[in-house]
Amino acid sequence: MFKDNGTDDVGSFDVTGSYSTDGNCMTLQKKYKRGTDDPRENLGHEVKIDLKWNDQTQQFDGQWIVRTANYSGQDKFNIKLRQHIESV
């Protein structure tokens, strides 16, 4: 389990997630902080993100899902890992 926070074009958010080595799957819950950034889009809502590791593309592929009283939607989502090379 992990926790973090960030900001995007909708607003500030907290994110929690978990990773399973069985199937290389990751699930994230992104919770927006109401009143930050775009008041039309930021309803203090949650976004569920389900991802699975793709060996061919070397990234996590999946989708995000939002279900609120005012909006329902889903779309593709991916996370690309960057290789970190440290020189000494």
Image (spheres, grey):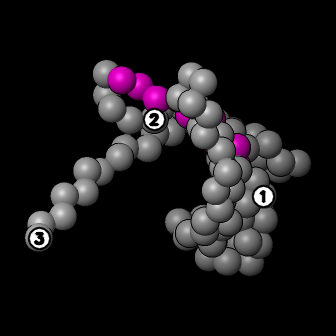
Residue, disc 3: 88
The residue type indicated by label 1 comes to His
Q: CA distance from mark 2 to mark 1?
A: 23 Å
- For this orientation, the residue located farthest to the left is 88
The residue type indicated by label 2 comes to Phe
User: Could you tell me residue 78's position as x and y percent?
Assistant: 46, 39
Q: Is residue 85 above or below residue 57?
A: below
Q: CA distance from mark 3 to mark 2?
A: 30 Å
Pointers 3 and 2 in contact (CB under 8 A)? no
Characterize the local packing of mark 1: few (<14), some (14-19) or many (20 or more) Cα atoms within 10 angstroms.
some
User: Could you tell me residue 81's position as x and y percent?
Assistant: 35, 46
Q: CA distance from mark 1 to mark 3?
A: 44 Å
Depth order, front residue of 35/14: 14
Q: Please tell me whether mark 2 or mark 1 is closer to you in this view.
A: 2
Query: Label 1's element?
Result: loop
The residue type indicated by label 3 comes to Val
